[in-house]
């Protein structure tokens, strides 16, 4: 049997999983895995409004799930690190197990 993490760690884990559990946010994360994209590109790929995408990106950024790079008037987003990629991959593999 494993050791239960501290309450603080459990709370932080719960927060990340809650944030990642939104279908629009999941689509955004998949859209920017391994490739920087601006809001317009994400809007086109995800098929949601610009205001919804911007709002969801703000939530993902606050949770440190995405990074942003500003270039003039445009902001480019990408998944924050390999941990986020791993989390998405593990969940994907789990739900597609036979």
Image (tube, rainbow, N blue to C red):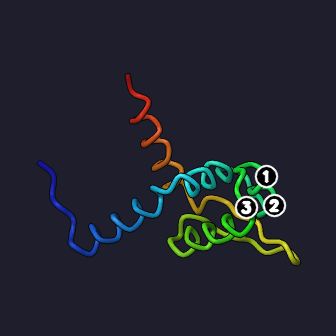
Q: Which residue is mark 2?
A: 40
Residue 41 horizontal/vertical position (percent): 80, 56
Helix, strand, or loop for circle 1? Answer: helix
Residue 96 is drawn in which quadrant? Answer: top left
Q: Count neighbours of disc 1 (C-alpha within 10 A) and say few if under 14, some if 14 to 19, many if 20 or more.
A: few
Q: Which residue is mark 3?
A: 49
Foreground residue among 30 and 86: 30
Residue 76 is drawn in which quadrant? Answer: bottom right
* Residue depicted at 33% across the width and 64% down the height: 14
Q: CA distance from mark 3 to mark 2?
A: 9 Å
Query: For the residues carrying marks 3 and 2, which lies nearer the camera in this image?
Result: 3
Query: For the residues carrying marks 3 and 1, which lies nearer the camera in this image?
Result: 3
Image quarter of the C terminus? top left
Q: Count neighbours of disc 3 (C-alpha within 10 A) and say few if under 14, some if 14 to 19, many if 20 or more.
A: some
Name the N-terminal-most of marks 3 and 1.
1
Q: Count neighbours of disc 2 (C-alpha within 10 A) and say few if under 14, some if 14 to 19, many if 20 or more.
A: some
Residue 22 horizontal/vertical position (percent): 50, 57
Q: Which residue is mark 1?
A: 44
Q: Is residue 40 left or right of residue 67?
A: right
Q: CA distance from mark 2 to mark 1?
A: 6 Å
Q: Is residue 40 left or right of residue 9?
A: right
Residue 95 horizontal/vertical position (percent): 41, 35
Q: Are marks 2 and 1 in contact (CB under 8 Å)?
A: yes
Q: Are marks 3 and 1 in contact (CB under 8 Å)?
A: no
Helix, strand, or loop for circle 3? Answer: loop
Q: CA distance from mark 3 to mark 1?
A: 9 Å
Task: Name, please, the residue furthest toward the right.
Answer: 72
Residue 39 horizontal/vertical position (percent): 77, 64
* Residue depicted at 56% across the width and 67% down the height: 60
Q: Is residue 97 left or right of residue 89?
A: left
């Amino acid at each position: 049997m494993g050791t239960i993490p501290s309450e603080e760690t459990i709370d932080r884990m719960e927060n990340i999983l809650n944030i990642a559990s939104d279908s629009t946010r999941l689509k955004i994360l998949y859209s920017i895995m391994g490739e920087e994209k601006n809001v317009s590109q994400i809007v086109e790929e995800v098929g949601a409004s610009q205001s919804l995408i911007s709002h969801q990106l703000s939530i993902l950024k606050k949770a440190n799930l995405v990074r942003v790079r500003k270039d003039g008037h445009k902001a480019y987003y990408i998944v924050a690190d390999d941990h986020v990629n791993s989390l998405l991959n593990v969940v994907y593999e789990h739900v597609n197990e036979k």
